[in-house]
Image (cartoon, helix red, strand yellow):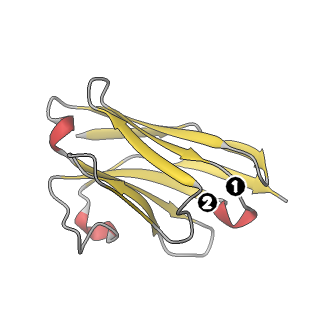
Amino acid sequence: VQLQASGGGLVQAGGSLTLSCAASGRTFSSYDLGWFRQAPGKEREFVAAIWSGGTTYYADSVKGRFTTSRDNTKNTMSLLMNSLKPEDTAVYYCAAASYISSYSYAAPGRYNSWGQGTLVTVSS
């Protein structure tokens, strides 16, 4: 599956932004999906995941502020980000995996397809 993330931009702290991830491929609904982010000088970190069945996981740093969802009829995944903070500034990536367990959803290496990333900048 090929992925393309979009929706990044500049937003003030406390604001909201919605990222989208468009996918190609007829088996999109069978993939487990994830969002990761990478800030300058830092390693890529897990943000959120949504399984093919709809189960979601979130990093503690975004829990309660971010919500991920998927629309299998449109081959898309979204990340609604509320109450944004300057520390949320990063390039955000969407990723897909054939199967992710409840032990490995936060590991970038478990995902085998990645989008190109979209930059989110949160100003203070």
Q: Is residue 87 left or right of residue 109?
A: right
Q: Residue at x 51, y 61 (%)?
A: 37
Is residue 110 found left or right of 90 in the rendered image? left
Query: Looking at the rendering, which quadrant does residue 21 occupy?
Result: top left
The mark nearer the N terminus, 2 or 1, is 1
Q: CA distance from mark 2 to mark 1?
A: 12 Å
What residue is shown with label 2?
90
Q: Amino acid at mark 1?
A: Leu
Q: Residues within 10 Å of mark 1 (few under 14, many from 20)?
A: many
SS at badge 2:
strand
**x, y percent for residue 4:** 41, 38
> Which image quarter holds the N terminus?
top left
Q: Which residue is mark 1?
A: 84
> Where is residue 114 drawn, in percent x and y?
34, 51
Q: Residue at x 74, y 45 (%)?
A: 10
Is disc 1 placed on a helix, strand or loop?
loop
Amino acid under label 2? Ala
Q: Could you tell me which residue is drawn at 25 percent across and 72 percent down?
A: 104
* Above/below status of 43 relative to 94: below
Q: Residue 5 or 28: which is nearer the viewer?
A: 28
